[in-house]
Image (tube, grey):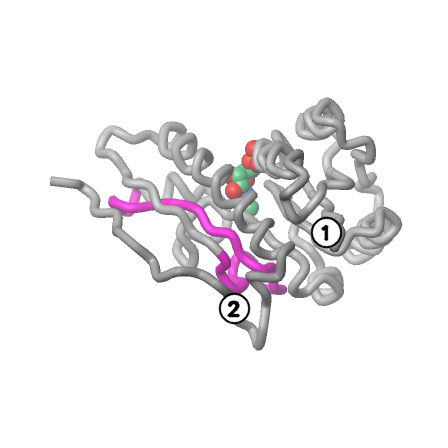
Amino acid sequence: MGRVRTGVLISGRGSNMSALIEAAKNDAFPAEIVVVLANNIDAPGLNAAREAGVKNAGIISSSFPDRQSFDRVLDESLRTANVSLVCLAGYMQILSPWFVGRWLGKLINIHPSLLPAYRGLHTHRKAIADGARIHGCTTHFVTPELDAGPIIMQAAVAVAPSDTEASLAARVLEQEHVIYPRTLALVASGLARLKDGRCVLDGMGEPRGSIISPSI
Ligand code: GAR
């Protein structure tokens, strides 16, 4: 069976996109990144994508009367590129229910918190303000409700008393780069899939270990 043709949507830096492209350079990886699209002309990730060898990397212009018109062009571009999976990687524009419905079960996202905690923006700031001892990141199938779709993978990091928003964000980002490629591999190989509003996982072992913070 061929590798699953995958598109990545970005709005900015694109470090998660780069982690996906890097993982997919291995021929044994079950997905290949064939197109990167940005909604933002300044997205530095577009250059990174081209430098990493993704020829089909471009911007969807933002001159549309409403979100669905924009999403129709986005949808058309993805279908023209013949993709079967779409990864949101720091894509900061809310997708229309129409688009989400069309790609349901084929559309995944990474979010910088242990969902369902801290949906939306400024997740690291909120975790620090709450005095959370453990924070992290989540990959999930996208559903119309923001940051609320069925969870695929999570990684936790301990929050240090000295953490700033930036230091915590950097440690969480490292884990994002670990779980996003693994998530894409699980979904592309069919081991993780959306069924009846849940993420079903096949062939996984029992979880081992735990994270305790502060560790004493
Ligand atoms: C990442 O931390 C990602 O989890 C977050 O934006 C950042 C993008 O960085 N996404 C969201 O907050 C979506 N709700 P990147 O462009 O370097 O991958």
Q: In this view, does 11 lie to the left or right of 80?
A: left
Residue 61 visible, this orientation = yes
Q: How far apart are marks 1 and 2 (CA)?
A: 19 Å
Up/down of 25 relative to 156, above or below: above
Q: What residue sits 42% from the left and 48% below the top?
A: 113
Marker disc for residue 200: 2
Q: What residue sits 72% from the left and 61% below the top?
A: 103
Using the image as rendered, state which of residue 52 and residue 190 is in the foreground: 190
Q: What residue sits 75% from the left and 56% below the top?
A: 84
The reply to whether the magenta stretch includes residue 136 is yes
The quarter holding residue 159 reads top left
- Which part of the image, by quadrant, shows the N terminus? bottom right
State ligand 1's quadrant: top right
| Mark 1 closeness class: few <14, some 14–19, many ≥20 residues within 10 Å | many
Using the image as rendered, state which of residue 131 and residue 38 is in the foreground: 38
Q: Is mark 1 on a helix, strand or loop?
A: strand
Q: Is residue 197 left or right of residue 69?
A: left
Q: What residue type is labelled 1?
A: Val
